[in-house]
Image (cartoon, rainbow, N blue to C red):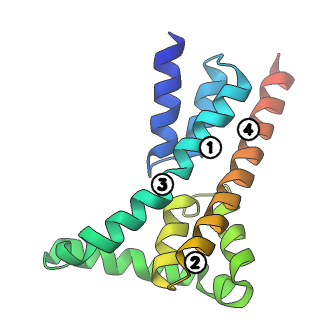
Amino acid sequence: MPVLDIIISFLWSLSPFGEAKIGIPYGLYSGLNSYLVFVVCFAANLLVFPMMLFFLENLHRYLLQWRFYKKSAIFVARRAKIGSGEKIRKYGFWGLVLFVMLPIPGTGAYAGSIASYLFQIQRRKAFFANALGVFLSCAIIWGTTLLYIQGKG
């Protein structure tokens, strides 16, 4: 059912377990219109940034009082700083774009949002860097998945 496949693609793209790296291939392999898949998955992945900022600015401070959450948050913050810190410090906006754009595990909109928060990057600048990185990542995944599907047929 196409509507269900669109919803599943959207949810994968919104999920921290795959983002559009999973949503796009799922939608394309389900036989959905390739342009619709790109738009839906890009939009869902783009929603991650405002959701994460809301969480980090409002709920994060409250949750830090719980030991398990605090240990987990410190672990994630260290990983984000190690994985992205040098690139973002050195290249600023473009470093963040590159970090979000790379379609590999540990990068993407969630990691880019956390890095933006940790390095206190101006919200507007961070949003545009994340948006451009998500767009480029979606384009890479979309293009390579389409090429792979066409090569198999």
For marks 3 and 1, the one nearer the N-term is 1
Cα distance in 3D space between marks 1 and 2: 23 Å
Q: Read off the residue under disc 4.
A: 142
Task: Tell me the amino acid under the disc marked 4.
Answer: Trp
Q: Read off the residue under disc 2.
A: 83
Residue 147 is situated, as x and y percent measured from the top left of the image, at 84, 32
For marks 4 and 1, the one nearer the N-term is 1
Cα distance in 3D space between marks 4 and 3: 19 Å
For marks 1 and 2, the one nearer the N-term is 1
Q: Is residue 20 above or below residue 132?
A: above
Residue 52 is situated, as x and y percent measured from the top left of the image, at 41, 62
Cα distance in 3D space between marks 2 and 3: 19 Å
Q: Nearer the viewer, mark 4 or mark 3?
A: 3
Tally of marks: 4
Q: Is residue 102 visible?
A: no
Q: Nearer the viewer, mark 1 or mark 2?
A: 1
Cα distance in 3D space between marks 2 and 4: 25 Å
Task: Tell me the amino acid under the disc marked 1.
Answer: Phe
Q: Residues within 10 Å of mark 2 (few under 14, many from 20)?
A: some
Q: Residue at x 13, y 79 (%)?
A: 65
Q: In the figure, is residue 57 to the left or right of 121?
A: left
Q: Read off the residue under disc 1.
A: 42
For marks 2 and 4, the one nearer the N-term is 2
Q: Nearer the viewer, mark 2 or mark 4?
A: 4
For marks 4 and 3, the one nearer the N-term is 3
Q: Residues within 10 Å of mark 3 (few under 14, many from 20)?
A: many
Cα distance in 3D space between marks 4 and 1: 10 Å
Q: Quadrant of residue 64?
A: bottom left
Could you tell me which secondary element the residue under label 4 belongs to?
helix
